[in-house]
Image (spheres, rainbow, N blue to C red):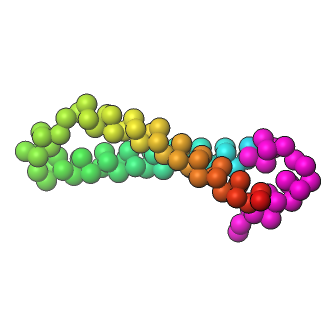
Amino acid sequence: MSKAPVIRIMSLLGAEEDKIFAPYMRLAIIHGLASALMAVSMMGLALLVLYYLAPWMYQLLELKNFLITIFVLLLASPAMHYLSIRQSIKIFQK
C-alpha cells in the first residue's frame, strides 16, 4: 500500500518536513541495517562454503579486504535506503 496520499495530506495540512520524514527515515535505517546484516551473513556463509569446498582458493582471499567490504556494506546499505526514501517522499509531496 502506497503512503503517497498520507504524505500529500500531511504536507497540505502544513506539517513540518521533519514530522513527515521521521517515521519513514527510521524505517529506512532499520531496513538498511537489516539488509546489510543479511549481506554480511551471506558473504560469511559463502566464505565458509568456499573454505570447505576449495581450501586452496580460500587462502587467496585477504582478511583485510573482506573486513573493508563488510564495513562498506554496513555503511552503504542504510545510507542508500535513507536517500531513496527521502527522494520518494519529496516526489509524493509535489
Q: Residue furthest front?
A: 94
Q: Quadrant of the N terminus?
A: bottom right
Residue 9 on the magenta segment? yes
Residue at 26%, 51% (x, y): give it: 46
The x, y position of residue 21, in whole percent, is 74, 46
Q: Nearer the viewer, residue 54 or 12?
A: 12
Residue 76 placement (x, y as % from top left): 47, 42
Seen in the picture, residue 47 relative to 2 is either above or below; the reply is above
Image coordinates for residue 65, horizontal then vertical, percent: 26, 35
The C terminus appears in which quarter of the rendering? bottom right
Residue 45 falls left or right of residue 37? left
* Highlighted magenta segment, given as a residue range: 1-21
Residue at coordinates 89% horizontally, 56% vertically from top-left? 12
Q: Is residue 80 above or below residue 64?
A: below
Q: Nearer the viewer, residue 90 or 44?
A: 90
Residue 79 lies left or right of residue 89; in this view the side is left
Residue at the extreme right of the image, as rendered: 13
